Image (cartoon, rainbow, N blue to C red):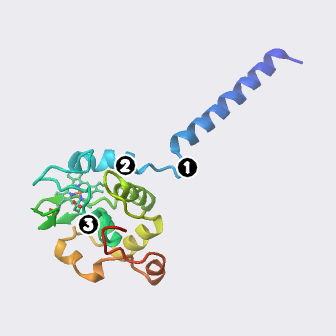
Amino acid sequence: MNLEKTIRVFGAVVLCSGLIIGKSAAQGSSGVNGEQLYLSRCMSCHQVDGNGISGVFPPLNEIDWVTGDKGRLIRIVLDGAVGEYDIGGMIYTGAMPPWKNFMNDQEVAALLTYIRSAWDNDASRVTEDEVRLVREAGGDRNQAWTAEELADEANQGIPGSLGFLLTPRDSTKSN
Ligand code: HEC
Protein backbone atom coordinates (compact mmCIF):
# COMPACT_ATOMS: atom_id res chain seq x y z
CA MET A 1 0.00 0.00 0.00
CA ASN A 2 1.39 3.34 -1.01
CA LEU A 3 0.77 5.52 2.05
CA GLU A 4 1.51 8.78 0.28
CA LYS A 5 -1.03 8.01 -2.44
CA THR A 6 -3.67 6.99 0.10
CA ILE A 7 -3.24 10.27 1.95
CA ARG A 8 -3.49 12.24 -1.28
CA VAL A 9 -6.71 10.50 -2.35
CA PHE A 10 -8.19 10.89 1.12
CA GLY A 11 -7.34 14.61 1.10
CA ALA A 12 -8.99 15.08 -2.29
CA VAL A 13 -12.17 13.34 -1.12
CA VAL A 14 -12.36 15.51 2.02
CA LEU A 15 -11.79 18.66 -0.02
CA CYS A 16 -14.50 17.78 -2.56
CA SER A 17 -17.15 16.91 0.00
CA GLY A 18 -16.31 20.12 1.87
CA LEU A 19 -16.93 22.12 -1.29
CA ILE A 20 -20.24 20.36 -1.97
CA ILE A 21 -21.53 20.71 1.60
CA GLY A 22 -20.39 24.34 1.79
CA LYS A 23 -22.14 25.20 -1.47
CA SER A 24 -25.51 23.71 -0.58
CA ALA A 25 -25.47 25.28 2.89
CA ALA A 26 -24.85 28.74 1.43
CA GLN A 27 -27.72 28.35 -1.02
CA GLY A 28 -30.31 27.29 1.56
CA SER A 29 -33.13 24.90 0.72
CA SER A 30 -34.68 26.81 -2.22
CA GLY A 31 -31.49 28.68 -3.03
CA VAL A 32 -33.25 32.03 -2.64
CA ASN A 33 -33.42 34.27 0.44
CA GLY A 34 -36.25 36.83 0.39
CA GLU A 35 -34.81 38.97 3.15
CA GLN A 36 -31.46 39.16 1.39
CA LEU A 37 -33.20 40.24 -1.83
CA TYR A 38 -35.13 42.90 0.08
CA LEU A 39 -31.95 44.29 1.62
CA SER A 40 -30.14 44.48 -1.71
CA ARG A 41 -32.99 45.69 -3.99
CA CYS A 42 -35.62 47.54 -1.97
CA MET A 43 -34.14 48.66 1.34
CA SER A 44 -32.38 51.74 -0.04
CA CYS A 45 -35.77 53.36 -0.65
CA HIS A 46 -38.27 51.55 1.60
CA GLN A 47 -35.76 51.31 4.51
CA VAL A 48 -34.72 48.37 6.64
CA ASP A 49 -37.78 48.69 8.93
CA GLY A 50 -40.18 48.85 5.96
CA ASN A 51 -41.41 52.27 7.05
CA GLY A 52 -39.97 54.19 4.10
CA ILE A 53 -39.23 57.92 4.31
CA SER A 54 -42.39 59.88 4.87
CA GLY A 55 -43.47 61.82 1.77
CA VAL A 56 -40.60 60.48 -0.36
CA PHE A 57 -40.50 56.67 -0.27
CA PRO A 58 -43.72 55.01 0.89
CA PRO A 59 -43.89 52.43 3.70
CA LEU A 60 -44.39 48.68 3.07
CA ASN A 61 -45.17 47.94 6.71
CA GLU A 62 -48.90 47.58 7.52
CA ILE A 63 -49.91 48.78 4.05
CA ASP A 64 -52.76 47.21 2.08
CA TRP A 65 -50.78 47.45 -1.20
CA VAL A 66 -48.42 44.88 0.37
CA THR A 67 -50.66 42.68 2.53
CA GLY A 68 -53.80 42.87 0.36
CA ASP A 69 -54.35 41.60 -3.19
CA LYS A 70 -51.30 39.65 -4.36
CA GLY A 71 -51.98 40.38 -8.02
CA ARG A 72 -51.54 44.13 -7.58
CA LEU A 73 -48.41 43.64 -5.51
CA ILE A 74 -46.79 41.32 -8.09
CA ARG A 75 -47.67 43.74 -10.91
CA ILE A 76 -46.07 46.69 -9.08
CA VAL A 77 -42.85 44.82 -8.43
CA LEU A 78 -42.57 43.41 -11.98
CA ASP A 79 -43.38 46.63 -13.87
CA GLY A 80 -42.95 49.45 -11.35
CA ALA A 81 -45.36 52.16 -10.17
CA VAL A 82 -45.88 55.71 -11.37
CA GLY A 83 -48.29 58.60 -10.76
CA GLU A 84 -50.31 59.43 -7.70
CA TYR A 85 -50.57 56.74 -5.00
CA ASP A 86 -52.47 57.06 -1.72
CA ILE A 87 -50.33 55.06 0.71
CA GLY A 88 -50.95 54.98 4.43
CA GLY A 89 -52.94 58.22 4.29
CA MET A 90 -50.30 60.14 2.34
CA ILE A 91 -50.10 60.93 -1.37
CA TYR A 92 -46.91 59.83 -3.14
CA THR A 93 -46.05 60.99 -6.65
CA GLY A 94 -42.67 59.33 -7.12
CA ALA A 95 -41.71 56.47 -9.39
CA MET A 96 -40.83 52.92 -8.52
CA PRO A 97 -38.51 51.10 -10.96
CA PRO A 98 -39.51 47.80 -12.67
CA TRP A 99 -37.81 44.58 -11.54
CA LYS A 100 -38.97 41.98 -14.04
CA ASN A 101 -35.68 41.84 -15.88
CA PHE A 102 -33.64 41.56 -12.70
CA MET A 103 -35.46 38.83 -10.76
CA ASN A 104 -36.92 35.47 -11.79
CA ASP A 105 -40.29 34.14 -10.56
CA GLN A 106 -38.72 32.25 -7.67
CA GLU A 107 -36.87 35.36 -6.47
CA VAL A 108 -39.94 37.62 -6.71
CA ALA A 109 -41.98 35.01 -4.80
CA ALA A 110 -39.39 34.75 -2.02
CA LEU A 111 -39.05 38.53 -1.79
CA LEU A 112 -42.81 39.17 -1.65
CA THR A 113 -43.34 36.34 0.85
CA TYR A 114 -40.74 38.08 2.99
CA ILE A 115 -42.29 41.58 2.88
CA ARG A 116 -45.80 40.20 3.47
CA SER A 117 -44.66 38.66 6.76
CA ALA A 118 -41.86 41.03 7.86
CA TRP A 119 -42.18 43.78 10.49
CA ASP A 120 -45.85 44.00 11.61
CA ASN A 121 -47.16 42.28 8.46
CA ASP A 122 -48.79 38.86 8.68
CA ALA A 123 -50.13 37.96 5.21
CA SER A 124 -50.05 34.73 3.19
CA ARG A 125 -47.06 33.71 1.10
CA VAL A 126 -46.65 34.32 -2.64
CA THR A 127 -45.76 31.30 -4.78
CA GLU A 128 -43.52 31.02 -7.81
CA ASP A 129 -46.55 29.91 -9.89
CA GLU A 130 -48.52 33.04 -8.95
CA VAL A 131 -45.65 35.25 -10.09
CA ARG A 132 -45.32 33.27 -13.33
CA LEU A 133 -49.04 33.61 -14.14
CA VAL A 134 -48.99 37.38 -13.59
CA ARG A 135 -45.77 37.74 -15.57
CA GLU A 136 -47.16 35.72 -18.49
CA ALA A 137 -50.41 37.70 -18.53
CA GLY A 138 -48.40 40.94 -18.62
CA GLY A 139 -46.82 39.86 -21.92
CA ASP A 140 -44.38 42.49 -23.09
CA ARG A 141 -45.93 45.33 -21.12
CA ASN A 142 -43.19 47.88 -20.68
CA GLN A 143 -44.86 50.51 -18.56
CA ALA A 144 -45.20 51.17 -14.84
CA TRP A 145 -48.66 50.80 -13.25
CA THR A 146 -50.74 53.74 -12.07
CA ALA A 147 -52.97 53.38 -9.00
CA GLU A 148 -55.92 54.08 -11.29
CA GLU A 149 -55.13 51.08 -13.51
CA LEU A 150 -54.70 48.84 -10.46
CA ALA A 151 -58.12 49.88 -9.14
CA ASP A 152 -59.57 48.00 -12.14
CA GLU A 153 -60.43 44.39 -11.21
CA ALA A 154 -58.93 43.21 -14.49
CA ASN A 155 -55.53 44.19 -13.10
CA GLN A 156 -55.96 42.47 -9.76
CA GLY A 157 -55.72 38.87 -8.63
CA ILE A 158 -53.84 36.00 -10.24
CA PRO A 159 -54.82 35.51 -13.90
CA GLY A 160 -55.80 32.16 -15.38
CA SER A 161 -58.56 29.91 -14.06
CA LEU A 162 -56.17 27.47 -12.39
CA GLY A 163 -54.32 30.24 -10.58
CA PHE A 164 -57.63 31.67 -9.55
CA LEU A 165 -58.75 28.35 -8.05
CA LEU A 166 -55.47 27.85 -6.24
CA THR A 167 -55.37 31.35 -4.80
CA PRO A 168 -58.61 33.03 -3.81
CA ARG A 169 -58.26 36.78 -4.21
CA ASP A 170 -56.94 38.57 -1.14
CA SER A 171 -58.99 41.69 -0.80
CA THR A 172 -58.56 42.27 2.88
CA LYS A 173 -55.55 43.20 4.88
CA SER A 174 -55.74 40.22 7.18
CA ASN A 175 -54.95 37.62 4.56
C1 HEC B 1 -35.59 53.96 -6.12
C2 HEC B 1 -36.45 53.81 -4.98
C3 HEC B 1 -37.25 52.54 -4.87
C4 HEC B 1 -36.79 51.23 -4.86
C5 HEC B 1 -35.36 50.75 -5.00
C6 HEC B 1 -37.95 50.40 -4.67
N1 HEC B 1 -39.09 51.16 -4.57
FE1 HEC B 1 -40.97 50.52 -4.21
N2 HEC B 1 -41.69 52.40 -4.44
C7 HEC B 1 -40.92 53.54 -4.62
C8 HEC B 1 -41.79 54.69 -4.81
C9 HEC B 1 -41.33 56.13 -5.01
C10 HEC B 1 -43.11 54.21 -4.75
C11 HEC B 1 -44.39 55.03 -4.95
C12 HEC B 1 -44.65 55.17 -6.45
C13 HEC B 1 -45.48 56.36 -6.84
O1 HEC B 1 -45.67 57.25 -6.03
O2 HEC B 1 -45.90 56.39 -8.01
C14 HEC B 1 -43.01 52.78 -4.49
C15 HEC B 1 -44.09 51.94 -4.30
C16 HEC B 1 -44.03 50.62 -3.92
C17 HEC B 1 -45.15 49.79 -3.56
C18 HEC B 1 -46.62 50.21 -3.52
C19 HEC B 1 -46.89 51.19 -2.42
C20 HEC B 1 -46.47 50.74 -1.05
O3 HEC B 1 -45.77 51.52 -0.38
O4 HEC B 1 -46.83 49.63 -0.63
C21 HEC B 1 -44.67 48.56 -3.27
C22 HEC B 1 -45.44 47.35 -2.84
C23 HEC B 1 -43.22 48.61 -3.46
N3 HEC B 1 -42.86 49.88 -3.84
C24 HEC B 1 -42.37 47.54 -3.28
C25 HEC B 1 -41.01 47.56 -3.58
C26 HEC B 1 -40.15 46.39 -3.56
C27 HEC B 1 -40.60 44.99 -3.18
C28 HEC B 1 -38.91 46.80 -3.95
C29 HEC B 1 -37.67 45.97 -4.18
C30 HEC B 1 -37.77 44.98 -5.21
C31 HEC B 1 -38.98 48.23 -4.19
N4 HEC B 1 -40.26 48.64 -3.95
C32 HEC B 1 -37.90 49.01 -4.58
C33 HEC B 1 -39.54 53.58 -4.65
C34 HEC B 1 -38.70 52.48 -4.69
| Neighbours of disc 2 within 10 Å: few (<14), some (14-19), many (20+) | some
The kind of residue on which mark 1 rests is: Ser
The kind of residue on which mark 3 rests is: Asp
Tell me, for residue 29, which label it has, or none: 1
Disc 3 residue lies near ligand 1 with CB under 8 A: yes
- Tell whether label 3 touches label 1 (CB within 8 Å): no
Q: Quadrant of ligand 1?
A: bottom left
Distance from the alpha carbon under mark 1 to that under mark 3:
30 Å
Q: Quadrant of residue 48?
A: top left
Kindly state the secondary structure of the residue where label 1 is placed: loop
Q: Tell me if residue 83 can be seen.
A: no
Q: Quadrant of residue 22?
A: top right
The kind of residue on which mark 2 rests is: Leu
Q: Which residue is mark 3?
A: 64
**Between 120 and 4, the one nearer to me in the picture:** 120
Q: Which residue is mark 2?
A: 37
Disc 2 residue lies near ligand 1 with CB under 8 A: yes
| Neighbours of disc 1 within 10 Å: few (<14), some (14-19), many (20+) | few
Distance from the alpha carbon under mark 2 to that under mark 1:
16 Å
Horizontal and vertical percent for residue 130?
Answer: 43, 70
> Which of label 2 and label 3 is nearer to you?
3
Kindly state the secondary structure of the residue where label 3 is placed: helix
Q: Viewed as shown, does residue 12 lie left or right of 37?
A: right
Give me the residue at 66% from left, 28% from top.
15
Horizontal and vertical percent for residue 95?
Answer: 16, 60
Horizontal and vertical percent for residue 145?
Answer: 22, 70
> Which of the image's four quarters has the C terminus?
bottom left
Q: Viewed as shown, does residue 120 lie left or right of 3?
A: left
